[in-house]
Amino acid sequence: MSLNVGIVGLPNVGKSTLFNALTGAQNAEAANYPFCTIEPNKATVPVPDDRLAVLAALAGPEKITHAVVDFIDIAGLVRGASTGEGLGNQFLGNIRDCSAVLEMVRCFDDDNIIHVNGCADPLRDMEIVETELLLADLQSVEKRLEKVKRAAKGDKAAQALHESLEALRGHLNKGLPAASFAAPVGETLRQSLGEQGLLTAKKIIYCANIDEGAVGNPEAVPHVRALLRHAAGTGRESVIVCAKIEEELQGLSKAEQVELLHAYGIKESALAQVIRCGFKSLGLTNFFTAGPKEVRAWTITGGSRAPQAAGVIHGDFERGFIRAEVTAYEDYIRLGSEAAARAAGLLRIEGKEYVVKDGDVMHFLFNV
């Protein structure tokens, strides 16, 4: 599995500029007018993880393979998108395929950069975006209700689903996102919601886009403070970036990028911030495989047991799982090899109930 992030927001707030900065792929046109992006731009980016290079120095593999994150730059949203305004349903449909949403919010004033609503106002802008997502979900649930209602006559499972969907519709009608729907969710409703891909059920990360002048002390900017208060109130992750500076990093060596970021007083790149928050929001973690052919990072949901982790590599590994050989990353590095860990009694044999930990170096035994 991989982290799949859709970059959304109003038109002309810096989505395509950030996409180019995050992905290093200058294929997203960034221009000073609304709806510059029509078709979504997509790019796959390696997840930075210094542990891979350390493992590779010891294992001497033929190649190193990072975990990846997919970024999608989605066309700008305007008020009324749920009823077809702007690019409307096309925009909303693109979000359904994303596991997390990076909501880009302009947090600076500049008369030279057009704002679709006249001026920057983070709280208003976030409300517009999230209201359209909620209205789209409400339409989706109502359509589903119509179908289920016809099947509910004489079918107890369909009747139960209909009642649950009615409760969800009431929840959405109160202006509350599907993510906060706390009513009992049976397997039938869970499957139904999964098929619908409700937009407000997705994890949202707020991204405050600031100008260069605010980089040294972004929280002094009223727009940024408003966004951070809103994020804290909703329990959502947030990042602060200057998309313009991040775009300047492209084409530079890693050392030059670090030097430029430090010159601006930026401790962490936008890519690192977004991936960290994305992993945290979705509860993701990485384990490693290491050998002479390849050292590789694999992404799993935190709390996954060994067979599920094996299944990320190949379905046969999960179906025929026998056991896993596990070495903690710290032990592997301290001792210098898997063989040394085995000799020291620190390579463990784990069964089907073992919960994989971040950084575990694993080998799977299976039989199909």
Image: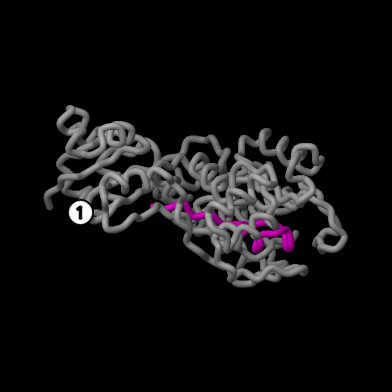
Residue, x 64% and y 72% (percent of image)? 38
Percent position (x, y) of residue 111? 87, 60
Percent position (x, y) of residue 328? 30, 33
Is residue 119 inside the magenta stretch? Answer: no
Percent position (x, y) of residue 362? 25, 42
Judge whether 366 appears above or below 146 on screen: above
Is residue 9 inside the magenta stretch? Answer: yes
Q: Which residues are magenta?
A: 1-18
**In-image side of 300 versus 89 (left or right):** left
Q: Secondary structure at mark 1?
A: helix
| Residue 170 visible at all | no
Residue closer to the observer: 59 or 89: 59
The residue singled out by tag 1 in the image is 316
| Snapshot quadrant of residue 20 | bottom right
Around disc 1, counting alpha carbons within 10 Å, would you say few (fewer than 14), some (14 to 19), or many (20 or more)? some
**In-image side of 302 versus 8 (left or right):** left
